[in-house]
Image (cartoon, rainbow, N blue to C red):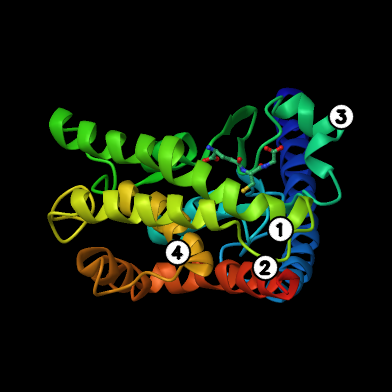
Amino acid sequence: MAIQFAVYTIQFAVYTIQFAVYMIQFAVYTIQFADDTKHDTVCSLHNTVCRLHDTRKMVLTLYGLEGSPPVRAVLMVIEKLNIPDVEFIQVDLLKQEHKSESFLKMNPHHTIPTLKDDDFVIWDSHAITAYLVSKYGKDKSLYPTEPKQRAIIDQRLHFDSGTLFPVLLETIKPIFYNERTSFNPETLVKISNVYELTEKILNSTWLAGDNLTLADICCYATISTLNIALPINSEVSPKLSAWTKRCSQLDFVKKANLPGLTMLDELVKSKLA
Ligand SMILES: N[C@@H](CCC(=O)N[C@@H](CS)C(=O)NCC(=O)O)C(=O)O
């Protein structure tokens, strides 16, 4: 009898504890739901990829500026792969925020884009986009593993890093940092040369063959920006012109490249005499 009573008492205690746990869980969910609603409102004020500011689910943090071409390459890949839960943190280069102690601690090279995935930090748009496809892409076609296909894509990505982007920096930097009010004519010749080179590389629908890949996304982010300084002439560069148009018509490009490109375009033009 006494044993049975003890068993009932223990059972009662267990049920009471379980009930308390459920009540706590309910309270936590209620608080989180209220918080989600607040975040959604904040988020709707932001655009495109910055869709979630939900600290509970947040995995990825992208540091950048929407106008920056390599940042736009990452935004396009996030959009294309439909990766949720990305927080976008603005790093204002003109305010030297990329040279702050906390940013340098994360990325000593002080460049945007920089991506943080929990404790893992990676910078350089080409490395970031490749990482995103490998880790989060349900479909790997943007960066296939077949060695020859991948080698061609890698070559185009290095072409962007080593050839296209330096010409872009040379074009834009003096406008922002040296208060130039016109493009340097020698730089415009360099742009024309890289257009010519790209025209020769373009032998298929897309930059690395018959399928859209990271090569198109990264190079388009740069070339669509070079186009601000020197519009592509469809008679001189028909393949480049057609490819540029093809890229610009993709939904994810409209969503994740166009807003930042337009912003940069207006900013650059406001500085020209
Ligand atoms: N190769 C790099 C280039 C990144 C880069 O130079 N970004 C510029 C902004 S568009 C930057 O962070 N400049 C600041 C600095 O170099 O201090 C990439 O693709 O991410």
User: Label 2 near label 1: C-beta < 8 Å?
Assistant: yes
Who comes first in sequence, dot 1 or dot 3?
3
How packed is label 3: few (under 14 Cα within 10 Å), some, or many (20 or more)? Answer: few
Quarter of the image for residue 82 reads bottom left
Who comes first in sequence, dot 1 or dot 4?
1
SS state under label 4: helix
Q: How far is disc 1 from disc 3 in space, using C-alphas?
A: 27 Å
Who comes first in sequence, dot 4 or dot 2?
4
Q: Which residue is mark 3?
A: 101
Q: Quadrant where the N terminus lies?
A: top right
Q: Which mark is residue 268?
A: 2
Q: Which residue is mark 1?
A: 175
Q: Which mark is residue 224?
A: 4
- Up/down of 52 relative to 94, above or below: below
How packed is label 4: few (under 14 Cα within 10 Å), some, or many (20 or more)? Answer: many
Mark 3 vs mark 2: give the one in front. 2
In the image, taking residue 93 as reference, residue 65 lies left or right, namely left
Percent of width and height locating residue 135: 41, 37
Q: Does residue 138 appear in the picture of this structure?
A: no
